[in-house]
Amino acid sequence: MSDLLSRGEIGLQIITLLISGITSTLGLLRKHFECCYAKEQVETYCMRQFFLVVLAATFAIAATPAFPDEVTAATHRLYDVHGTRLYVETFGDGMPIVFLHGGLHFFDNSFQLQRDYFASFRKVIGIDQRGHGHSPDNSRPFSYREMAEDTASLIALLGVGPVDIVGHSDGGNVALLLARYHPEVIRRVVISGANLRGLPADEWQRRSQWSPQQIKEKVQQLSDRLPPDFRTDYQSVTPDGSEYWWAHLTKSYQLWLTPVVIETVELKAIKTPVLVMAGDHDLTSIEETVEIYRGLPQGQLLILPATGHGTFSERPAQVNLAIREFFARP
């Protein structure tokens, strides 16, 4: 359908029909009871039932997720940025939202339950970072700061800034660095499962001395613990070949050893409004998540109960609504 009705418009139509039907029904009830009860009692009873039904209908409509029947046709292409090529997908029209995926993931398998929802009323831009998803890799190691610089340059290249940003896990780390060093391209930011630091400096120093064989063994152990779809999803889309999984996993493992992603004092310099989300059983501790929130001058906090690291897939209704309301503010 070419012209989608908003949930509010549909809800208004439904409530109008309900009111019409309820009014007719209450008229019949009024005639039936007036013979047995005082007029005031009958009127009070009928009005109470009227408001209860309308209230119940309103809550039911408000709780219904708004998913469109179709979304504006997507565009997919590679952009040259800083000597690499980044794969970008766009959907929908309106104010742009840029989605930044987490480690070992890419846009398509990170935000499946957000893409169409937000594309029904906003322009959705999904970026695969270098070496992730459809974007080819090069010889450089992965770096949060480099990903932030690539993303800022891409936003400028697309000519869509300032944008709203949604970042999950590593994407949340990148979003914080974007807000710190490129506030001119950002309006508001939502992060989930982000972290301030990887390893203590002494542990990072010890691991940096590991031999290639030790690193290979640790990466193999990591691969064995991962859900199988991490590898199969990557191999199904990467332009680097299925065997590049091991190089990709090794680079990701080394990225996660980063001692400090962003200093707490740097959070104070971020003036952009940031919604900090996490599951109460997230990979990042609640204490560290609260530390991020408290360090941000315009931070807001949302901890999702009975939820792990996969907030966007485990709690899509709550997450989508929270993001929508946060971005709707001026």
Image (cartoon, rainbow, N blue to C red):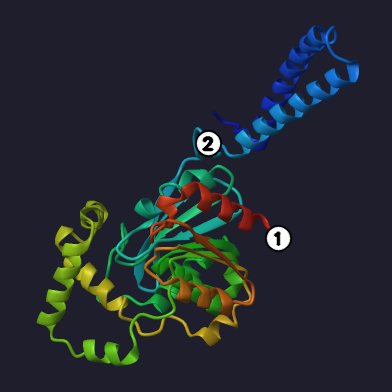
Tell me the quadrant of the picture where the N terminus can be found: top right
Answer yes or no: is residue 94 visible.
Answer: yes
3D distance between C-alphas at marks 2 and 1: 25 Å
Decide: is 32 above or below 134: above
Decide: is 252 above or below 116: below
Answer yes or no: is residue 161 visible.
Answer: no
Q: Toward the viewer: 204 or 328? A: 204
SS assignment at label 1: loop
In the figure, is residue 8 to the left or right of 24? left
Q: Which residue is mark 2?
A: 68
In the figure, is residue 61 to the left or right of 317? right
User: Residue at (53%, 47%) from the top-left corner?
Assistant: 118
Q: Extreme left residue here?
A: 213
Image x and y of residue 257, in percent: 30, 80
Image x and y of residue 297, in percent: 63, 77
Q: Toward the viewer: 55 or 43? A: 43
Quarter-of-image position of residue 261: bottom left
Question: Dot 2 surroundings within 10 Å: few (below 14), some, or many (20 or more)?
Answer: some
Decide: is 165 above or below 291: above
Question: Dot 1 surroundings within 10 Å: few (below 14), some, or many (20 or more)?
Answer: few
Image x and y of residue 168, in percent: 43, 63
Indicate which disc residue 330 carries: 1
Tell me the quadrant of the picture where the C terminus can be found: bottom right
User: Residue at (55%, 73%) from the top-left corner?
Assistant: 293
As shown in the figure, which amino acid type bears the numbered disc 1?
A: Pro
SS assignment at label 2: loop
As shown in the figure, which amino acid type bears the numbered disc 2?
A: Pro
Image x and y of residue 166, in percent: 50, 61
User: Residue at (61%, 73%) from the top-left corner?
Assistant: 184
